[in-house]
């Protein structure tokens, strides 16, 4: 194998995109999942940059080795001269002078005009390129060449040195035609492979994001995507217990649901917690597409149960309830309405979260209701740990 097909950057690009499947494997094996899938995409982008530099600065400089062709031309020239010598044997000079060149073995003095033209044609056809250029310069344009030479002599040393450095940097890489074709083929395959790996890496990241969206410890960067997309990869837990070592405080948990586009009903027995919550929460960014947060009970509106249920069902707003007694009545009413929606095979577009933040444990009737009705209707019960930091 010719290791001069690529330069160092080219081989580094190959190593980087080959490492991408390794990172995918590590990402799929680790629990909880980390950021190996995203690092793999970064590897692919860096590999593409390095491969492009290798293609433009190395592979494009490769030229075929012309040594064999030059040797063949010289052999053909020698053969033509030998044929001429054999056919004009009587014209060959026996005397050789010190100033004669290697090809000055034919006596041109005894030739007629037709023979001289024949010999001139042979010599002209087989003359090297520099000699032809020299003749063309000597035949005309001498003043321009002289001016060019004078201008070149007067050029600043920095310009001359810069031109020489550029010429040295762009010195062609010579190899056989077969190796040159192989280098171009490998360069094209390398670029195509990197682009394919980047595309696969992006698909992997998107699928991984959707798979982690309903996993409390692994979800990140909530986006208002349809719940059907997310739930098709990982169904949400019907009853999710918030761990004591929670990732976020309760207000941030509620903001997380809003940024996902999911409405919620926050039930608490502490009016101070309810008063700390804002009047609305952003669905996108910090202040974009605000979602109203309506209050029920003490200091709030006396909304009817039907209004609360329908508003949550269609995702028009979220609610805060700071009355445990009212919460039990509301949950019993929700149970009856969910039964009707299940029988009609109706389901919410965005998951509705009932956030239970009371000192009292969740009643068994509520748990059974959610276990039976929530999966088919799209509701979820999020239970906050009593000892968690809020």
Image: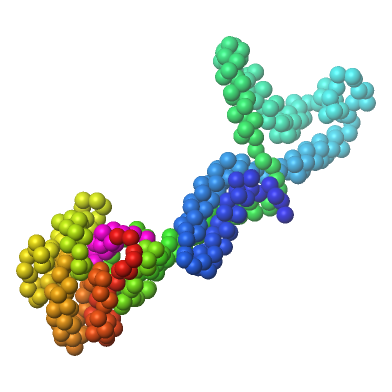
Point 67% across, 22% down: residue: 134
Position of residue 220 measured from the top left corner of the image (x, y, whole percent): 37, 60
What's the coloring here?
rainbow
Residue farthest to the bottom? 343
The answer to which quarter of the image holds residue 68 is top right
Compare residues 232 and 155 and report the one nearer the observer: 232
Q: How many marks?
A: 0
Q: Is residue 36 visible?
A: yes
Q: Is residue 80 visible?
A: no
Residue farthest to the right? 94
Point 65% across, 18% down: residue: 138
Compared with 144, 10 (above or below) is below
Looking at the rendering, the stretch of residues picked out in magenta corresponds to 247-263
Point 87% across, 38% down: residue: 86
Position of residue 224 measured from the top left corner of the image (x, y, whole percent): 27, 62
The answer to which quarter of the image holds residue 229 is bottom left
Q: Indicate whether residue 154 is drawn in magenta.
A: no
Position of residue 278 measured from the top left corner of the image (x, y, whole percent): 18, 55
Compared with 109, 283 (above or below) is below
The C terminus, quarter of image? bottom left
Compared with 368, 185 (above or below) is above
| Side (left or right) of 314 relative to 115 | left
Compared with 75, 21 (above or below) is below
Position of residue 344 measured from the top left corner of the image (x, y, whole percent): 17, 86
The answer to which quarter of the image holds residue 248 is bottom left
The N terminus, quarter of image? bottom right
Q: Indicate whether residue 260 is drawn in magenta.
A: yes
Compare residues 198 and 347 and report the one nearer the observer: 347
Point 12% across, 72% down: residue: 308
């Amino acid at each position: 194998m010719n290791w001069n097909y690529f330069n160092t950057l080219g081989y580094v690009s190959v190593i980087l995109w080959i490492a991408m499947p390794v990172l995918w494997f590590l990402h799929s094996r680790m629990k909880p999942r980390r950021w190996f899938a995203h690092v793999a995409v970064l590897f692919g982008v860096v590999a593409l940059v390095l491969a492009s530099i290798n293609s433009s600065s190395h592979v494009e400089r490769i030229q075929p080795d012309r040594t064999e062709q030059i040797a063949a031309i010289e052999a053909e020239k020698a053969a033509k001269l030998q044929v001429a010598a054999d056919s004009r044997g009587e014209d060959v000079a026996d005397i050789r002078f010190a100033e004669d060149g290697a090809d000055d073995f034919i006596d041109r003095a005894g030739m007629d005009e037709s023979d001289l033209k024949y010999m001139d044609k042979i010599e002209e056809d087989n003359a090297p390129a520099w000699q032809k250029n020299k003749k063309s310069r000597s035949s005309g344009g001498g003043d321009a060449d002289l001016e060019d030479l004078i201008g070149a002599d007067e050029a600043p040393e920095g310009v001359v040195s810069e031109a020489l450095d550029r010429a040295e940097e762009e010195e062609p890489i010579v190899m056989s035609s077969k190796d040159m074709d192989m280098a171009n083929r490998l360069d094209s395959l390398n670029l195509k492979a990197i682009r394919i790996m980047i595309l696969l890496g992006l698909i992997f990241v998107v699928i991984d994001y959707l798979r982690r969206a309903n996993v409390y410890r692994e979800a990140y960067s909530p986006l208002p995507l349809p719940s059907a997309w997310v739930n098709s990869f990982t169904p949400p837990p019907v009853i999710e217990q918030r761990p004591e070592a929670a990732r976020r405080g309760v207000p941030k948990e509620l903001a997380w649901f809003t940024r996902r586009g999911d409405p919620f009903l926050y039930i608490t027995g502490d009016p101070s917690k309810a008063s700390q919550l804002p009047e609305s929460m952003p669905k996108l960014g910090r202040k974009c597409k605000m979602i109203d947060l309506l209050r029920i009970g003490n200091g709030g509106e006396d909304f009817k149960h039907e209004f609360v249920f329908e508003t949550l069902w269609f995702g028009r707003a979220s609610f805060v309830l700071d009355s445990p007694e009212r919460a039990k009545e509301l949950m019993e009413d929700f149970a009856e309405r969910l039964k009707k929606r299940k029988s009609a095979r109706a389901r919410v577009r965005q998951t509705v979260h009932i956030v239970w933040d009371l000192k009292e444990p969740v009643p068994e009737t509520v748990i059974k209701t959610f276990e039976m009705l929530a999966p088919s209707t799209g509701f979820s019960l999020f239970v906050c740990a009593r000892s968690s930091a809020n």
